[in-house]
Image (cartoon, coloured by chain):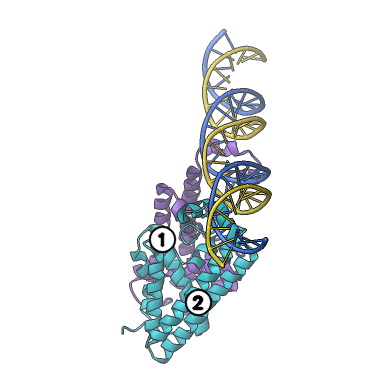
Chain colours: A purple, B cyan, C yellow, D blue
Amino acid sequence: MRQNGYGGFSYAHLAKQAGIRKASIHHHFPAKADLGLAVLDRYADRLVTVLDDIKATSRTGAQSLQACISLYRTALDDGAAMCLCSALAADQSILTDPMSAMLTRANGKVIEWLETVLLMGRQDRSIVVPGLPADDAVAVLAQLQGAQMLAKASGDMAIFDTALSSLQARMSRS
Amino acid sequence: MRQNGYGGFSYAHLAKQAGIRKASIHHHFPAKADLGLAVLDRYADRLVTVLDDIKATSRTGAQSLQACISLYRTALDDGAAMCLCSALAADQSILTDPMSAMLTRANGKVIEWLETVLLMGRQDRSIVVPGLPADDAVAVLAQLQGAQMLAKASGDMAIFDTALSSLQARMSRS
DNA sequence: TTCTGTCAACCTACTAGTCGGTAGAGGTAT
DNA sequence: ATACCTCTACCGACTAGTAGGTTGACAGAA
């Protein structure tokens, strides 16, 4: 799903990779939407866990944000994939309502996390936050996801870091 | 293509909307990739034209950038669609090489335009440009495309403006 | 121990429908 | 006559999804 989007992967393709038959997947996930929802649910859970781990082991807000950026760069996987939330956004028109709602919730969780990190960074003077942290958090997520898209589209991973240059400029080295 | 991506639209769907048969489209565009390339080519041309028009009728860099933001907001079409370059990025894995190359070129054109606008804005003091305009242009495009994605994913168009808050903060009112 | 029933997991084989693409007939305007 | 365009009818491959059978592990009773 992260490589080809929601409409771009099939039970047949999945079955071949897993070494089982299509029907066996249908046994566990009757409809494609069930599988999609389960994958997104697990993804959102894991993402929150990783982000919370980052915050727990970082001393400054900038350190947290830097680790988050690295996470999104790694998720690019040399242009093969992107963050699931970005990949699903493009296929939003074919998503079921539960999936669409969970996608919004997942994005919301990341935005919340970014907001706390920006607040922390403002307090410890490691990040420059011009406006409301709640608004800026949305802007940062947009820049992260947009950077992934530009890098994936061109196949040039260096674009990812360039697209985050204005964000890096707001952070102090540590 | 802007609504459902490259893999998400079909000759059958297109034929029904156009009121002709599938085969007639194949007469003009033998393969789907031919149609995709033609659409992207025309899109890139028109985009450049519109952007140049904007620059010609704007007095300051900020005015140009503001008009560009409006353009991307309009392109969202209440969450139904997004910029073709963003829509294609998600389907990058199924794009033919010519399409992929043209996508990169199209993004490059926009980045070039943004760079000149940022330079202008820096000169007339209407935009704050922290680092290299060439790098910042990539960052701005990432933020624009990311803002579209977040807004489309949630169905809430207000998210688009929120995601551009940090960009707006760098521009002077006019 | 051994028989029996239950259950999840998996399989083969199939459905209806869609995908991109093709062959060739027929119409139409120059 | 000859391009040019649109059509009907079709192809093989693929899509999600279903029906029904096989396997093996486990639980309880004789």
Question: In what quadrant of the picture does the C terminus of chain B appear?
Answer: bottom left
When the figure is inspected, residue B21 is found, relative to residue B171, above or below; the finding is above
Tell me where residue A161 sits by quadrant: bottom right
Q: Is residue B135 depicted above or below C12 in this figure?
A: below
Percent x, y of residue A88: 48, 56
Q: Earlier in the sequence, mark 1 or mark 2?
A: 2
Chain identity of mark 2: B
Residue at 60 percent of width and 66 percent of height: B99
Q: Is residue A42 left or right of residue A11?
A: left
Callout 2 crowding tier (Cα within 10 Å): few <14, some 14–19, many ≥20: some
* Residue B20 visible to the viewer: yes
Image side of residue A32 versus residue B29, left or right: left
The three-letter code of the residue at mark 1 reads Lys
Q: Residue at 37% across / 88% down in the picture?
A: B59
Q: Quote the CA–CA distance across marks 1 and 2.
A: 21 Å
Mark 2 residue type = Val
Secondary structure under the numbered disc 1 in the rendered image: helix
SS state under label 2: helix
Residue drawn at point x = 42 percent, y = 86 percent: B56
User: Residue at label 1?
Assistant: B152
Residue B110 is labelled as 2
- Position of A35 relative to B113 (above/below): above
Expressed as whole percent of the image width and height from the top left, the position of residue B97 reads: 64, 65
Label 1 Cα neighbours within 10 Å, binned few <14 / some 14-19 / many ≥20: many
